[in-house]
Amino acid sequence: MSLSIRNQLPGTVTAITPGEAMATVKVRLDGGQDLTAAITSEAVEELGLAEGSAVRALVKSTEISLATGSVDGLSIRNRLPGTVTDIATGGAMASVKVSVDGGDLTSAITKDAVTDLGLGAGTAVIALIKSTEVSLATM
């Protein structure tokens, strides 16, 4: 199966916290970072997820925000440090490639945000991803 989701990071399930309708699944990415996905309990069951399961974390580029420094007071669980490797800008939007341990991410943000943050190749950033925006696929 081919997907249009550019961000696909391999990892291993390290913990599952079940709930009535939703569950949180902690994943240790191959680069060593931890990522949390909030998915339905039904999906956990259908995918056969358990500690040790190999998965791919999938995140649309429009769901990745970037920060140039530490951010306090946010409910966003997933914060992956990385470095900007490339930026392609259009009239209103930009595609920012970020290298993180174990892979690369693409973030779609406004051109104004690129300017306001002073982003360029080599800029240190933190990729911010809400746990509800992380999908999991079994490998």
Image: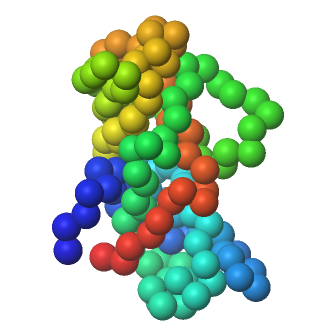
Give the image location of residue 5, x and y in percent. 32, 56
Give the image location of residue 61, x and y in percent. 39, 44
Q: Is residue 22 left or right of residue 103?
A: right
* Location of residue 106 (image quadrant): top left
* Location of residue 124 (image quadrant): top left
Q: Is residue 3 above or below residue 17?
A: above
Marker count (numbered): 0
Q: Is residue 73 above or below residue 48?
A: above
Closest to the observer, 136 or 61:
61
Q: Residue at x 50, y 71 (%)?
A: 13
Q: Residue at x 35, y 61 (%)?
A: 10
Q: Residue furthest front?
A: 91
Quadrant for the N terminus in the image: bottom left
Closest to the observer, 28 or 40:
40
Q: Residue furthest right?
A: 73
Give the image location of residue 74, x and y in percent. 75, 38
Q: Is residue 81 above or below residue 50?
A: above
Give the image location of residue 63, x and y in percent. 49, 46
Q: Is residue 28 left or right of residue 121?
A: right
Quadrant for the C terminus in the image: bottom left
Residue 52 shows up from this direction: yes
Q: Residue at x 60, y 20 (%)?
A: 69
Q: Is residue 25 left or right of residue 53?
A: right
Q: Is residue 136 left or right of residue 97?
A: right
Residue 36 shows up from this direction: no
